Image (cartoon, rainbow, N blue to C red):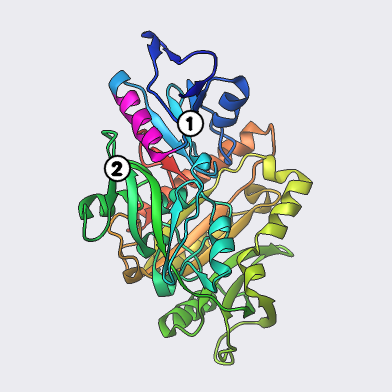
């Protein structure tokens, strides 16, 4: 028997109290749960739901989607709540908190079955014990599996393996009609292609069989610093073309009044770097597990200073390689520290577009896709700066789309139903 808050009915504006479907999990209208579900990590969009569901099974998710469809109310799935523009919020519907679907099941040497609400941290903890790891992982391991697959999922290994959505064998999906379907490249292939990378528009992912590859025990991290943007992008392109390193990504950092660019190239070996055009280099050896969790100490610092809890009006765009240097040069000329914010950061790396095979995962219309992520943090209570940041983000999205690029992990329309 389902456990509801007070009674198994939901008050829907204009319709009165409506009987809820039977659920193995719970549905709550408690103030605490509603308050938690009305905001995401971005912290600048607020929408208060009618109720929050905590499913026990994927069947619960399907029942809730059918209920929402029958009564004309939106139902959205929330993974780890790390969307930044309200993708997993609804002002007059039901939020399904997927964290209660967090199972990581027994696996074979090349795959693992994972519930959509599980964090990538739990996946890594399970697979590394057997010496394996998913081919592509996010920088931040506390994102949910379903959320990442619903956006695509890029990382430093995307130049080899594409997006994380390219590295799944099958999915369980609740369709917009409320049907629970298993899909793969050979069964229900149209749904399998439609649901990856489209932020829930074609269904809610409830489980995934994720591909695995062998994991090293240790890696060598090469951090190469550049002051010339063209040299930085050129060397990144060379490294990904040659597959010289296993992992290639990078950041832009504002230091002493100037932007510098840090290319991070990681491998179990020490490939040559003498032919590259960096200004300085640092090479360190690290345990592979520590490398995967490299964001954790940064998160701890941001939590301690408070900026982790401030608004995060972020913009992630995918630029065409042929236009990237000009767009980036213009962007960096205008990106001042106050428009990035305390604790803000900039991601900047590229990969061959052909590596992205999932047809709905966004990419640039160019042989190379350049991921440009402006991770802003707005001062709390400063609506003027927040507005300026959001305007700058909108302009960046518009520029990327106009030139043949794309927005990434950005709300596509009002019906988005799943976010990381």
Q: Is residue 351 above or below residue 73?
A: below
Q: Using the image as rendered, state which of residue 160 and residue 96 is in the foreground.
A: 96
Can residue 36 be spotted in the picture? Answer: yes
The disc at residue 25 is: 1
Task: Measuring from the top left, give residue 380's x and y in whole percent.
Answer: 69, 35
Q: Quadrant where the N terminus lies?
A: top left
Magenta segment, prevailing SS (helix, strand or loop): helix
Task: Measuring from the top left, give residue 390's x and y in whole percent.
Answer: 53, 40
Can residue 87 be spotted in the picture? Answer: no
Is residue 47 shown left or right of residue 187?
A: right
Task: Measuring from the top left, give residue 37's x and y in whole percent.
Answer: 55, 30
- Secondary structure under tag 1 reads loop
- Verify CB contact (< 8 Å) between mark 1 and mark 2: no
Is residue 107 shown left or right of residue 176?
A: right
Quarter residue 16 falls in: top left
Residue 62 on the magenta span = yes
**For the residues carrying marks 1 and 2, which lies nearer the camera in this image?**
1
**Residue at left offset 27%, top offset 37%:** 179
Quarter residue 385 falls in: top right
Residue highlighted by disc 2: 202
Task: Measuring from the top left, give residue 228's x and y in whole percent.
Answer: 58, 75
**What residue span does the magenta drawing correspond to?**
57-69
């Amino acid at each position: 028997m389902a456990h509801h808050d007070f009674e198994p009915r939901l008050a829907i504006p204009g319709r009165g109290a409506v009987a809820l479907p039977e659920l193995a999990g719970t549905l709550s209208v408690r103030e605490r749960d509603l308050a938690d579900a009305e905001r995401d990590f971005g912290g600048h969009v607020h929408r208060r739901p009618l109720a929050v569901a905590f499913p026990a099974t994927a069947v619960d998710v399907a029942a809730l989607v059918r209920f929402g469809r029958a009564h004309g109310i939106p139902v959205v799935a929330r993974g780890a709540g790390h969307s930044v523009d309200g993708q997993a919020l609804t002002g007059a519907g039901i939020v399904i908190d997927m964290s209660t679907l967090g199972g990581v099941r027994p696996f074979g040497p090349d795959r693992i079955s994972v519930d959509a609400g599980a964090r990538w941290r739990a996946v890594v903890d399970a697979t590394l014990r057997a010496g394996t790891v998913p081919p592509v992982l996010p920088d931040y391991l506390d994102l949910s599996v379903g959320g990442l697959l619903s956006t695509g999922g890029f990382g430093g290994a995307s130049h080899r393996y594409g997006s994380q959505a390219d590295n799944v064998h099958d999915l369980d999906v609740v369709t917009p009609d409320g049907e629970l379907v298993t899909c793969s490249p050979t069964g229900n292939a149209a749904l399998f292609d439609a649901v990856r990378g489209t932020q829930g528009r074609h269904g809610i992912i409830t489980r995934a069989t994720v591909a695995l590859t062998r994991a090293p025990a240790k890696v060598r991290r090469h951090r190469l610093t550049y002051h010339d943007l063209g040299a930085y992008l050129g060397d990144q392109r060379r490294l990904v073309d040659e597959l010289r390193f296993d992992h290639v990504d990078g950041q832009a950092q504002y230091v002493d009044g100037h932007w510098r660019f840090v290319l991070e190239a990681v491998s179990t070996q020490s490939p040559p770097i003498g032919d590259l055009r960096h200004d300085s280099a640092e090479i360190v050896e690290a345990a592979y597990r520590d490398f995967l969790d490299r964001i954790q100490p940064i998160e701890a610092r941001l939590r301690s200073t408070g900026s982790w809890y401030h608004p995060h009006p972020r913009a992630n765009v995918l630029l065409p390689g042929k236009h990237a240097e000009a767009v980036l040069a213009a962007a960096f000329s205008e990106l001042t520290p106050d428009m990035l914010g305390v604790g803000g950061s900039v991601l900047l790396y590229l990969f061959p577009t052909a590596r992205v095979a999932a047809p709905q995962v966004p990419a640039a219309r160019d042989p190379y896709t350049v991921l440009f992520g402006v991770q802003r943090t707005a001062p709390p209570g400063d609506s003027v700066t927040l507005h300026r940041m959001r305007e700058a983000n909108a302009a960046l999205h518009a520029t990327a789309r106009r030139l043949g690029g794309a927005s990434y992990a950005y709300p596509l329309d009002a019906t988005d139903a799943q976010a990381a």
